[in-house]
Amino acid sequence: MTIDDIMALIASDESRTLELKKTTGELKDGMHTACAFLNTEGGWLIFGVAPKSLKIIGQQVTDDTKREIAQALAGLEPAYDIPPIYVDVPEYPGNKVIAFHFDGWKLGDKPYTFRGRPYYKIESTTKIMPRDMYDERIRIHEPHSYSWESLPARGVSFSDLNRDRILGCIRLGVEGGRIPESALTAPIEDTLAKWKLTVNGVPTNGAAMLFSNNIYPYDNFQLRLARFLGNDKLEFIDNQRAEGNFFDLLDAGMAFLFKHLNLSGKITNRSLMREERLEVPVSALREALINALAHRQWEKANLTISIAVYDDRVEIANPGILPPKITAETIKDSHESYPYNRNMAHALYRSTFLESWGSGIRRIIEACREQGVEEPTWRWDGGFVYVTFKRSTKAAFDASKDHLGGDDTLSTPQVPPKHPLSTPQVELLSEKMGDSYMTMKEIAELCGVKDLKYFRESYIAPALEARIIERLYPNHPKHPKQKYRKTKA
């Protein structure tokens, strides 16, 4: 590097990538800038140039000067090896300009600090990096060490986990060829450990989110559900709040969508069987809700996932961020998988609830195309990721008649189609129960069962899952005065 190169560098004055210091007497401030360059886009730090006049003066460089520079650079963490560039100043014999070029930060790099403090650049100004930005970069750099899902669960033990849910996931994974059949007889704790849902022998936050019946330590294991009148939030027709683990929230969200979206029926020419579908494809809505639950930033305890149904659209809002290198404009393009909660996503992939390789967005779009529904849109407002589905009109259903080859009728908003009675226990419970609310003990006596724990797991839980019965207090599953009755469905 020559003095002409220095003159070319400083020609445009200080900027986001250029900082000038008169002498190494400003070495400490210079290292703040060096740290900021390393955490932003990189840049040049030059000693020996007057910042205001841009006059190149240089300075004497002694052994003490070199030692001070080395000590200052040692204050950068992680260590950064950069040799100073010394350039002679012809107008001042014996003086030298001291230049450093620092590389910029790349996604996945650990953020730099100088003597324990991180700095970054805002235009030409050096600032201390905000805590949330620093934490986010640390999390990206070491996701397993610092992620919320990997921390030990608060107040949740293995006995709080829903073993039926876990076994159900294992069975699905075995049937889908993603879990070895030996997992069916292996201890559940071993499978959770393989899915990295335990730490030091206790469940993690990720395990609690997926499977815990005890959600009270977590205020944000909730889902806000609203059906608004019109196309804004001025007035609502239905306003609910569900709480529970991943599967509880998924069920509650889908039930709400079935309740408030139009259901169409058609008789197909081939089978003469009636097929039913929502105005927005069920598979697309389910995939979008699964993505919101699996990839949200659960560490943001004061925020909640929401489903809002308007006259003209459905919006699912997820407290989180878009994956790295993906924007709302490019999210529909082919891309790799960047799960925010890697362990939870891995468990859901093994149990076939999620796919890898970033194919979820494509499946949502394809489901909408197959049904002749407009593709959804995505946006991020800095705090929430939104996916918006346009609601179909009567005309849209009529226009699809010929394509589907059937007789189409449009119904009013309905509850989901009736689920099959999956077990003899549920059949017995359904036969014995009436339409009025009853306590679990009263229902157990009707069914001739004395073991209430067994009755809860083998009768009540599967009947709730199949939506054959409903709770008196749906938002408080463990309410001391909880009762149950058969649903209208």
Image (tube, helix red, strand yellow):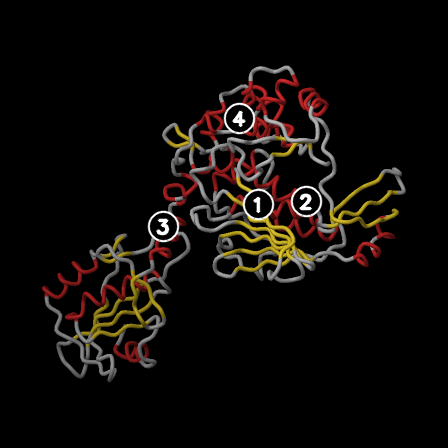
Label 3 CA crowd tier, 10 Å (few <14, some 14–19, many 20+): some
Q: Are marks 4 and 3 in contact (CB under 8 Å)?
A: no
**Viewer-side residue, 161 vs 190:** 161
The vertical placement of 431 against 396, above or below, is: above
* Among the two numbered marks 1 and 4 on one chain, the one whose residue lies closer to the N terminus: 4
- Kind of element beneath mark 3: helix
Q: Amino acid at mark 3?
A: Ile
Which residue is the site of mark 4?
163
**Viewer-side residue, 114 vs 334:** 114
x and y percentages locating residue 149 in the rendered image? 43, 40
Which residue is the site of mark 2?
283
**Viewer-side residue, 338 vs 222:** 222
Image side of residue 446 versus residue 20, left or right: right
Which residue is the site of mark 1?
357
* Among the two numbered marks 2 and 3 on one chain, the one whose residue lies closer to the N terminus: 3
Kindly report which numbered mark, 4 or 3, lies closer to the viewer in this rendering. 4
Give the Cα separation between the discs numbered 1 and 4: 29 Å
Label 2 CA crowd tier, 10 Å (few <14, some 14–19, many 20+): some
Q: Amino acid at mark 1?
A: Trp
Q: Quadrant of residue 374?
A: bottom right
- What numbered label is drawn on residue 138? 3
Kindly report which numbered mark, 3 or 1, lies closer to the viewer in this rendering. 3
> Residue at horizontal 36%, vertical 62%?
104
Kindly report which numbered mark, 2 or 3, lies closer to the viewer in this rendering. 2
- Kind of element beneath mark 2: helix
Give the Cα separation between the discs numbered 2 and 4: 26 Å
Image side of residue 280 versus residue 339, left or right: right
* Among the two numbered marks 3 and 1 on one chain, the one whose residue lies closer to the N terminus: 3
Q: Amino acid at mark 2?
A: Ser
Q: Amino acid at mark 4?
A: Arg
- Kind of element beneath mark 1: loop
